[in-house]
Image: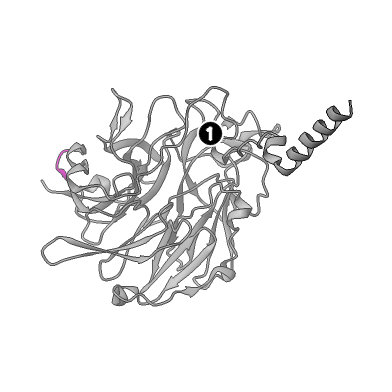
Amino acid sequence: MVRTSLLAAGFLAALATFPALAQAPAPAPVPGWAIGRPEGSTLAPHAPRLTVTPVDQVPVGALRLPPGFQAEIYAHGIPGARMMAEGPNGTVFAGTRAIGRVYAISRNPDGTTRTRIIAQGLNNPNGIVMVGNSLFVIALNRVLRYDNIEANLDNVPAPVELTEAFGLPGDADHGGNHHWKFATLGPDGRIYTNVGAPCNICEIDRERFALLVSFNPDGSDRRIEARGVRNSVGMAHHPITRELWASNNSRDWAGDDSPDDTLYRVRRAGEDFGYPFCVGSWADPQENKGRNCSEFSQPAALLGPHVAALGMRFYTGTMFPEQYRNQIFIARRGSWNRTRLTGFDVVVAKLDAQGNVTAVEEFLTGLRDDANQRFLGRPVDVQVLRDGSMLVADEQMGAIYRITYRQ
């Protein structure tokens, strides 16, 4: 009996020295995107390719456009390229997310391009905008200003740190959800950006999250432009009316066909578009809390369920035919939270003289293979150049296409 007790005591003592043997390991935390995923579902985000794609594998030949339009590779070998901005001297800047870089792409006299990495090691530097000769980079909550950037592409100076002045919520505040930024310069000289929802669908502080906001370029005078916008990664001002328009990504895990991603037209500062209660007339089954969706402003257009509508711009050039002038081009990165793929294209929202959307039409297709349920690329942004051509950034291929028109 004494011997048995001694053996038991020795066994327990040994367990105490090896805690991993004494208790099962804690389960891995559920990533934010998977919260709410139905049991048994295998749907998950498509990881972007973050290595260089050989130029002969960039699928420019698969692109389909309306008659008279052509596509060519403008630049390649730029992994993760996303949101774009054009400098006064024609340099095209491109931000990224996971790869943490900002690229500068300049055009050589022979029509080829040269790409430089002008910043790296940043946390999701997706939001970029030119203000005069200065490039602003918004990496989550961090705001950096690179002065006289086009004259210093080979010797980039240390940026001016404006993070404290802008006071955007940090990564911890967002819980890893919808914290990447888009940025645009308004006709009033202010910088407009987004503050996404810190979750898929949940109660939020509606003065801090799910917002479109604007600032003076020094970070002062924060102004809420719109509330109830879950996750906008694209916005632009109408070139004539100066109204702010924005794309929006709606919630996941509410089914293959609901809710739609949306296009919003902001007619007054502080306008409320309903997140988390509603998306247009669709009452969220989880968070509606008895709210009537008519309380909130309605979308200017529905863009399709889970299409990931991102970068958008008004066409302000003269190269494209007249019917495209002042119309909205929208890059739809493509679905992951849907059984059958949707998106992976660029569409154009057609506006009438009163600014109402009359149709949303396909413009650039060919990257989604419906028969095999696979995709060749992922358009994430469009940028109208001063010559009237339009760039399309393909994050998956690390390439930028140039779209031109000739009769």
Residue sitting at 37 percent across and 54 percent down? 83
Q: Is residue 275 left or right of residue 329?
A: right
Q: Please state which of residues 400 and 319 is positioned toward the viewer in this rendering.
A: 400
Give the percent coordinates (x, y) of residue 206.
65, 49
* Mark 1 burial class by Cα count in 10 Å: few <14, some 14-19, many 20+: many
As drawn, 353 above or below 289: below
Q: Is 383 positioned to the left or the right of 167 in the image?
A: left
Q: Amino acid at mark 1?
A: Asp
Q: Report the front residue among 395 and 63.
A: 395
- Disc 1 is placed on an element classified as loop
In what quadrant of the picture does the N terminus appear? top right
Residue 249 in the image: state x and y as whole percent. 49, 41
Q: Position of residue 241 (x, y in %)?
A: 41, 56
Task: Say whether residue 355 is visible.
Answer: no
Q: Which residue is at 46% across, 67% downward?
A: 188
Front-lying residue, 384 or 301: 384
Check disc 1 and report the residue beneath it: 252
Image quarter of residue 62: top left
Q: Is residue 122 visible?
A: yes
Magenta span dominant secondary structure: strand
Residue stretch in magenta: 67-71
Asked where in the image residue 102 lies, by quadrant, the reply is bottom left
- Residues 59 and 261: in front is 59
